[in-house]
Image (cartoon, helix red, strand yellow):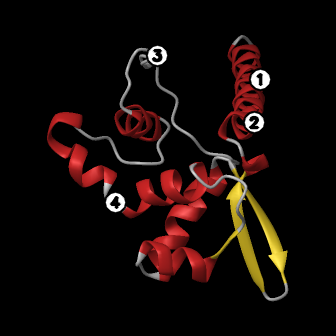
Amino acid sequence: MFEMNINIVNPMKHEKNIDYVLLTFLSSIGYLPRIDPQRDFETAIKSVPYILFKECFLEHGERWWSVDELLAYLKTTRPTLYRHLNKLKSLDILEERQEGMSKRYRLRYGDLSKAWTFVEANVNLAMQNYRIMVDHISSLIRR
């Protein structure tokens, strides 16, 4: 099921620090917890979910990663890895491919910009469904 936080944020077009921009972005969509960039920046950019997204999926977008490869790269536990993979899957930003008995993952289309079109489509669908519900609630209350 698609799930994401939506916040109005500064697009930070003039910021040159990729880690600062990416950290703000991932935090604002709910993939990472809210952080104070002044206090938590160094810890956050060394965290498993951040490295998973940036180094594995963003910097190596075309690569299909197995769970074992991700575990070795991130030096983390299986439950931790799956928690973060599932967050990214709930955003509909990952592709999953079955290979034999295992699965491989990559950023959808191997490209963040292309993957984001799926997120936008899901947000639009969710907003349309909310509109239908609001209209229905309004009609029910008028009865």
Q: What element carries label 2?
A: helix
Tag shown at residue 47 = 4
In the rendered image, the vertical position of residue 48 relative to residue 94, given as above or below? below
Residue that mark 1 sits on: 128
Dot 2 or dot 3: first in sequence order is 3
Which residue is painted at 71% across and 29% down in the image?
120
The answer for how far apart the CA atoms under marks 4 and 1 are is 35 Å
The answer for how far apart the CA atoms under marks 2 and 3 are is 19 Å
Residue that mark 2 sits on: 114
The answer for how far apart the CA atoms under marks 2 and 4 are is 25 Å
Which residue is painted at 43% across and 81% down in the image?
77
Residue that mark 3 sits on: 13
User: Residue type at mark 2?
Assistant: Lys
The answer for how far apart the CA atoms under marks 4 and 3 are is 24 Å
User: Residue type at mark 4?
Assistant: Ser
> Disc 4 vs disc 1: which is toward the camera?
4
User: Residue type at mark 1?
Assistant: Gln
Dot 4 or dot 3: first in sequence order is 3
Q: Where is residue 81 in the image (x, y as percent from the top left)?
A: 50, 72
In the rendered image, the vertical position of residue 86 relative to residue 21, given as above or below? below
Q: What element carries label 3?
A: loop
Dot 1 or dot 2: first in sequence order is 2
Dot 3 or dot 1: first in sequence order is 3
Q: Is mark 4 on a helix, strand or loop?
A: loop
Q: Position of residue 114 (x, y in %)?
A: 75, 36
Tag shown at residue 4 = none
> Disc 1 vs disc 2: which is toward the camera?
2
Which residue is painted at 38% across and 25% down in the image?
16
> Disc 4 vs disc 3: which is toward the camera?
3
Q: Are marks 4 and 1 in contact (CB under 8 Å)?
A: no
User: Residue type at mark 3?
Assistant: Lys
- Quick one: 132 or 10, which is closer to the camera? 10
